[in-house]
Every structure is written in structure tokens, then in C-alpha cells.
Image (cartoon, grey):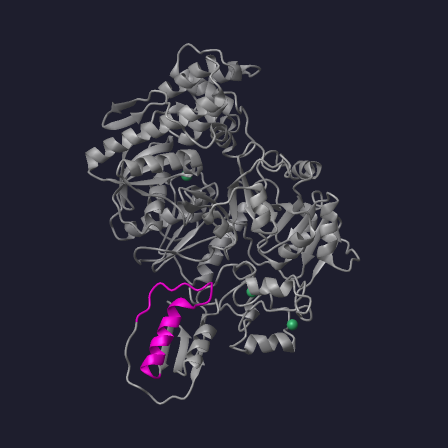
Amino acid sequence: MVQGVGFRPFVYRIAVAEGLTGFIRNTASGVLIEVQGRPGSVGEFSRRLCCEGPPLSRIEAIVETALPPGEETEFSIGVSGSGEEVETLVPPDIALCRDCRRELFDPSDRRFRYPFINCTNCGPRYTIVDRLPYDRPFTSMHGFTMCPECEREYRDPFDRRFHAQPNACPVCGPRAVLLDASGELLDVPDAVAGAAAMLRQGKIVALKGVGGFHLTVDASNGKAVENLRERKGREAKPFAVMMRDPVIVSTYCSLSPVETEALSSPEAPIVLLRKKANDGISSSVAPGNDRLGVMLPYSPLHALLCADAPEVLVMTSANFSEEPIVTDNEEAIIRLGGIADFFLVHDRPIYLKCDDSVTVELSGRLRQLRRSRGYVPVPVFLRQGGPVVLGTGGELKNTLALLKGNHALLSQHIGDMKNYDAFSHFEHAARHLQHLFQATPELIVHDLHPGYMTTRWAEEQGLPVLGVQHHHAHLASCLAENREGGPVIGLILDGTGYGTDGTIWGGEVLIGDESGAERFAMFEKMPIAGGETAIIQPWRLALGYLWRSSPELPALPFMEGRPLGPVLELLRRGTGVPETSSCGRLFDAVAALVGLRGEISYEGQAAIELMHAAGPEAGTKAFPHEIKREKGLRLMLVSPVVMAVAHSVNRMVPVPDISRMFHRTLVNLFLDIISEAATVSGIRTVALSGGVFQNALLFETLVTELENAGYRTLTHSLVPSNDGGLSLGQAVIGRSYLAGRYLGVS
Ligand code: ZN
Ligand code: ZN
Ligand code: FE
């Protein structure tokens, strides 16, 4: 990453400092530098090149060649053959840097309290770029003409703002204003201070950030938070919060070194932290959850607001549940007018929607749960190059992935493809990705599910297409980000994915690699009584699982007041009852069975609450488990687990104990099946993928146990283990198809 991050001026400065002549220019794959001078100076230049680079630059490799000396008298920037200098990579949006932060709060600085301060090391990038080259006229800053002072900084290679495309100041740049709920301009001396005052009064403020609008409210004000939930139509899904600095964060949450580093990183993601017992934050912020999503202010506007406002602010994407984030001022006032009391907006347009990224530390490493702002469009580096291929992702948590050379370019988080807005966001992102990186795919890869919007879109593009199995794509995604070729034993634990047999998979052991996999084992199939309704009403799942497991239905508390008759009738008839081996559904069913949650209001809620009930450790007690052989396929039996849970409920075993035993049972079951797979295949590397691995308790216990048993584990950290990482796996499988190696899942 040496383009658009201040790398050329850096090289210019060290070359001049070492008294060297020559040039630096961008090439399609990086930069080319030629220097001439005394050997000692060249050596020193080489050393500084490696270790003093700008914060956002990343050097993969340096290749050195000796050349005969030539006639030259100076070091120059950007003299290429054609005389044109093209930036081929767009950097991500980067959080406010330390230098800009200092200037922002320095009363003697000309950018004191200027909400759009930035420099070569920080500021918006991806979200303000319309097209290449990454140059000011093609960004949303094109409408602002730099004042002489800004212009001077922009032109001076020794200035921190040399070629900082969004460079601006209070004289020449964007401005923030405060509007009321109907969009009328409020006459306040300082828009940010005005918004902060409203927040202190418990008002809801819509704030135009980097990749879209946020809705913000004082997190300590329970009434205000409830009010926001009510108006936004989001019953229980946890809200993220923003806090001024890590010291304040540490009063509410425990912080490890990895988490502290992540919070303060240039990517500034949301980090899911463990809550401390501290009643300063309203329980409505993240109900039923032992974690709190926290981020630090990453734009100067956020930093100013946090300095003036209550110390913990709810900071949630401004949209209605599961719709794409709102980016445009007028659109915001129309769509958010019923939610926000005030609007803190500005006149720098957002060209690309980009949600906040969400991460969590598991087993000592930072893991992506939603890879978006700050990370996109930094490529995921692949093991090898190949043809251009586009992966279209899945139906939920959608992303796209474009493979070009050894770069996997993933789109920002697009979301759930169940509404028209998300689909148009998807189409835009698909076009933008191909345009931005100037690549047309030779193949478009989609999910095997015939009904997905992404499948239909792929088929309409007039290019060769390939449908791949959902969980094979999860496996390939894990291999790809670890730059591994396999073959491996893949344990794929997921919510939903269309299987090669038309049933819904989601708890499979696949042995193979990106070109193909053998289904070695799966969970015993269970009925989804009521299809989509059962997904949002897990009590229906629980009833179906129980009915399948035991002919004589025990009476359990979760059944009270539920219309059991029609569900049982449905089960008996069996039509319109899909069969599934999903591990995610098993979690939902058990959560309902123990009486924890019969209905959910967001995906994964039941499973999260079940994990939360267990506490931090799985313990050693477990239910018995069983693996059955059936026509060469191994079945991990679900009925014995369901029955054991039901008996425990009957014996009034406390829910936390049942939850711990349930988690431990699964770990034991997986260890056994992996041991069988290792014996049969001779493979001792295990890849873990699928959305269920967001479950910290299951993931961390299993990883520890596998490593103790001598297995090598491959896990996700760069892309999500959930469907957000699916597109990467699809695209990589697509390359094996183009190479004539694809075998699919057998
Ligand atoms: Zn800066
Ligand atoms: Zn200016
Ligand atoms: Fe999935």
C-alpha cells in the first residue's frame, strides 16, 4: 500500500535528506524508485525506506537492482514514461491522526475546531472518490477551491498535507450546520457545540459522518435510548457506542492490549468489548449481551462532538432496520425526520455508503465481524494471482469480492439483500468495484441458491457464471485469507446455506480445498416447522426438534401459551417443512427449549443470549453425544442433545448450567468427528468457518482443545467467518473452475 498514503513525498524527503538524485513513480503494482549517490547514503536510504514509512503505507517486498550511474542533478516525483501519473489504488477512510487531533484542539492553530481537518495520514478517501485517478477533481471535494494557504500545503512535498486530496480549512472547505427536525437551519454560533447541548438534553441527533449518517443519543439516558429504539423500529439489537478516549472506555469495559490497539488504530473499528459492572450506561443500549460495541471518534466532527457531549454516545447507523445506511442530506431529512430531533450535517457529499466495521478479539486475535469502513478497499493478499473473478456473496451480510492478480478486493458491507434499497446498493457496489479497479471479470460466481437476488443478478450480466455451494465457499474463504492451499478438514458451522441436495445445510465437515470438497459428516437433519416464521420464532424450531427427537412430547415451560396444534399438524403432514443440518438453528432451538427466548427481533439473538447465559467458560460437564454412520456419511446426532437438554429443563437445572453443558457437548462432538476425519484422511489441519464461530465461547474453547490435541487450526481474522466472507471464497473457487480443476462438493 504505497499509493495515496503519502509515500512519494516521504521518499522524496529521505532522498533529499541523504543527498541522493533520481526519481519515484507509481506503477500498476507499487512504486519504482531510482536513487543515485554515495553507497553509504544509498544504504541509509534503503534502511529508512523500510522502517520510517508513513503510517498507512505497507511494504510487501522490496526488490533491489544495481544500475550504472547516469547524469542527473535532482530527485523528482512522478516522472513516468507517459508523463501521466495514475493512482491505481484508493486508500480506505482513515481515522483522525494524532497531529491533526492536536491541531484540532489547539486554539492557536488555523484549523482550531475545524470539523474537516485532515492530512496525508488521515481523512476520508474511499467514501469521497467518484472515479480514478484518486485526485481532487474526482472526489466530493471538487466543489471546494483551496485557499492560497491550503494550496501551498498541498504543493509542498515537505508539508504533511502534500497531495492530501481532501485538504481544507475554515476559509475554503466544507462547513457543518445544525438543522431542526424539519431541516430548518438553526442559528447557533457553533453547530457542533449546539448538537452537543441537545444531546445533553436527551435529544436524538442525526449526524453526517464519513460513510453515512449516524443516530446519536446520550447512552446514559435510558429514556432517550428507549425513545430512539422506539422511533427506529429496532426492538433489541445492540447499539454501538462512541467514547472520547480509551481511558473512558476502560471505566465501562475491560480492555486487552489487542483491543486497545484496535480501538486506536487508523481503521478505528467498532470493537465488541466485555462490559464491566458499571451502571453508567443504560441497559437498553445492549440488552441481553455481555459485550458492548465501542468505537473511538474517528472523524474530526466526531472528536469535537465527543469533547462537548455526554461521555458515552449511542452511535448507530441511521437507517430503518436492515436497510442501507443513509448518506444524503435531503434524503436524511425525509427518511430520518421521524427519528431525529436535530441534524448535524455538512456540505461535503458522501459518494459511497460505508458502514462502521465491527471486530472482536477471540483467541488473542482481532476478528472481523463486519469488514467495512477503514479496511475497504485494502486488498486481502492471496497466495497467488490468476484471472479476474467476481464473487457476489450471499443473501445476508452481503459483500462482493473482485479478484485481480493476487489482490482480493472486497466491497464494503452491503447488508441483507431482502429489500430494494439493499439491492440497488449492491448493484452500485458491483459496478463501482469493477470501475474503480478497472477490471472486468471472466467469471461471476454466485451462491447455489436459485432464489437469491445475487444469483439472479449474476445470471443477468451476460458473463460466464458458476454457482457454488455455500459452505464450500466458507471453507475456501478461510483457506484464501490464510494463504493456504489445503486440503484441510473444514468444520463449517453456519446459519443457513443451500445444500447440493436441496436441503438447508449449516453444520458440515467438508474435507477438501478450493477446487472441491467431500462431505464427510453433517448434523442430523431436523425440521424447520413453519419455514421463515420458525426462524424468527425459535419456539417453533424447538417444538419441531423435540417432536423429531421424541415421539412422546414432554411438557416443557416454553410451550405454555403457544399455539402448538397447528405446528404439530404441520410436522405430521411434513409438507412445507424444510429439513436442516444447521448449527445456528440448533442454537436457536436450544435457546427456546430452555425458555430463554421464544421469539427474536434480530438474527442471532437467541444464540447470543444462550451464550451470554453460560458465562465466560464452558466447564467440563457435558451431555452424552453420538455419531452415527449412514451410507459412508457420518451423522452428528442432534436428538440425544435435544432430549438431554429437555430432561435438564424438566429437572429444573439452571439455564446457565445447561448452556455451559450444551457448549461443552458440541466441543466434544466436534473433537470426535475431527479425529475421525483426521484418521480417515491423514490431514491434521482444521479450518473453522461459518457464522456460528462468532460465538466466542464455542470458538475459543474449540480452538484451544484442537490445538491441545495437536491440530493446526486455520481461522478467520481478515474477513468475517459469517457470510460477509463468502464472496472471497466464491471468487477463489471460481479461479479453480477457470483452471479446469473444479469438482464441487460430493
Ligand atoms: Zn492527519
Ligand atoms: Zn483553506
Ligand atoms: Fe453462511
Q: Quadrant of ligand 2?
A: bottom right
Residue 106: which quarter of the image?
Answer: bottom right
Residue 199 placement (x, y as % from top left) = 71, 47
Which of the 4 image quadrants contains residue 631? Answer: top left
Residue placed farthest to the right in the image?
187
Q: Which of 341 and 254 is in front in this view?
A: 254
Number of callouts: 0
Q: Measuring from the top left, give residue 591's x and y in whole percent.
A: 48, 25
Residue 157: image location, x then y, percent:
51, 77
Asked whether the viewer can see residue 576, the reply is no
Q: Does the magenta stretch include residue 2?
A: no
Magenta range is 37-63
Tell me the quarter of the image containing the N terminus: bottom left
Q: Is residue 663 left or right of residue 596?
A: left
Q: Residue at position x 32%, y 34% from top?
A: 705
Is 58 one of the magenta-colored residues?
yes
Q: Is residue 289 above or below residue 249?
A: above
Residue 206 placement, left or right of 660: right
- The image quarter containing residue 673 is top left
Q: Which residue is drawn at 41% across and 88% down?
A: 73
Give the side of residue 240 with respect to residue 434, left or right: right
Position of residue 507 measured from the top left corner of the image (x, y, whole percent): 36, 32
- Quadrant the C terminus occupies: top left
Q: Which residue is drawn at 73% across and 44% down?
A: 203
Above/below status of 706 relative to 256 = above
Q: Tell me: residue 564, above or below residue 214.
A: above
